[in-house]
Image (tube, rainbow, N blue to C red):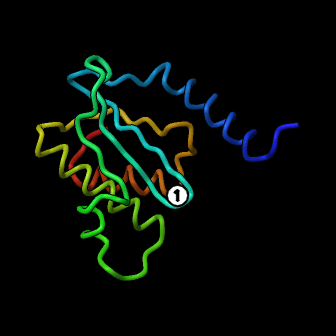
C-alpha cells in the first residue's frame, strides 16, 4: 500500500506532466520553473530548445539570503525574495518575457508569491 506522501508526490508529478504539455520554454520566451520543498523554494529560467538553464535562484542562494536579512521570515517571504532576485538576474541577461511553469503545484501561497514578486521585478508572463 502506498503512503500518503508518495500518493501526493505521484499526483503532483502527473499534474506537472500535464502542465508541461502546453508550457514550453523557447529561446524568445524561456520557461520559469518553480520547485518547492518543505524548507526551500527553487526557481529557474530554462531554454528548452537549447536544454540549458539560463538563470536560477533559490532560498539557499547568497543573493536571496542578503535580500531576506537576518530576521525571522516566513517561507512565503523567502519565496518573494527568490522571485525578486530571479527577475533582477533575468533582466540583467536580457530576458523580459517568460512562460510560467508552476510545476504541478497550486497557484497559491509560495508559488503565487514568487510569481507576483517576479512580475514586480519586471518579468512579463
User: How far across and down, in percent of the image, does residue 8 sit?
Assistant: 71, 42
Which image quarter is the N terminus in?
A: top right
Q: Which residue is at 27% across, 55% downward?
A: 120
Residue that mark 1 sits on:
109
Q: Which residue is at 39% across, 54% downward?
A: 114
- In the image, residue 69 sits, relative to residue 104, either above or below, namely below
Choose between 5 and 20: the one closer to the eye. Answer: 5
Disc 1, SS:
loop
Instruction: Tell me where residue 82 sits by quadrant.
Output: bottom left
Count of picture labels: 1
Which image quarter is the C terminus in?
A: top left
Q: Which residue is at 32% across, 62% downward?
A: 81
- In the image, residue 17 sits, relative to residue 108, either above or below, namely above
Give the side of residue 89 with respect to residue 12, left or right.
left
Give the side of residue 11 with respect to residue 81, left or right.
right
Give the side of residue 55 with respect to residue 102, left or right.
left
User: How far across and down, in percent of the image, does residue 30 sit?
Assistant: 28, 29
Instruction: Tell me where residue 94 sits by quadrant.
Output: top left
- In the image, residue 104 sits, relative to residue 82, either above or below, namely above
Crowdedness of circle 1 by 10 Å Cα count: few (<14), some, many (20+)?
few
Q: Which residue is at 66% across, 40% downward?
A: 9
Instruction: Tell me where residue 70 sits by quadrant.
Output: bottom left
Amino acid at each position: 500500500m502506498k503512503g500518503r506522501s508518495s500518493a501526493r508526490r505521484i499526483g503532483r508529478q502527473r499534474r506537472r506532466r500535464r502542465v508541461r504539455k502546453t508550457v514550453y520554454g523557447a529561446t524568445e520566451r524561456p520557461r520559469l520553473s518553480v520547485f518547492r520543498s518543505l524548507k526551500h523554494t527553487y526557481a529557474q529560467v530554462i531554454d528548452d530548445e537549447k536544454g540549458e538553464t539560463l538563470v536560477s535562484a533559490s532560498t539557499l542562494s547568497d543573493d536571496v539570503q542578503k535580500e531576506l536579512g537576518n530576521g525571522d521570515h516566513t517561507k512565503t517571504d523567502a519565496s518573494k525574495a527568490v522571485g525578486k532576485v530571479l527577475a533582477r538576474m533575468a533582466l540583467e541577461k536580457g530576458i523580459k518575457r517568460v512562460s510560467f511553469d508552476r510545476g504541478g503545484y497550486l497557484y497559491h501561497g509560495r508559488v503565487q508569491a514568487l510569481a507576483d514578486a517576479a512580475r514586480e521585478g519586471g518579468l512579463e508572463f
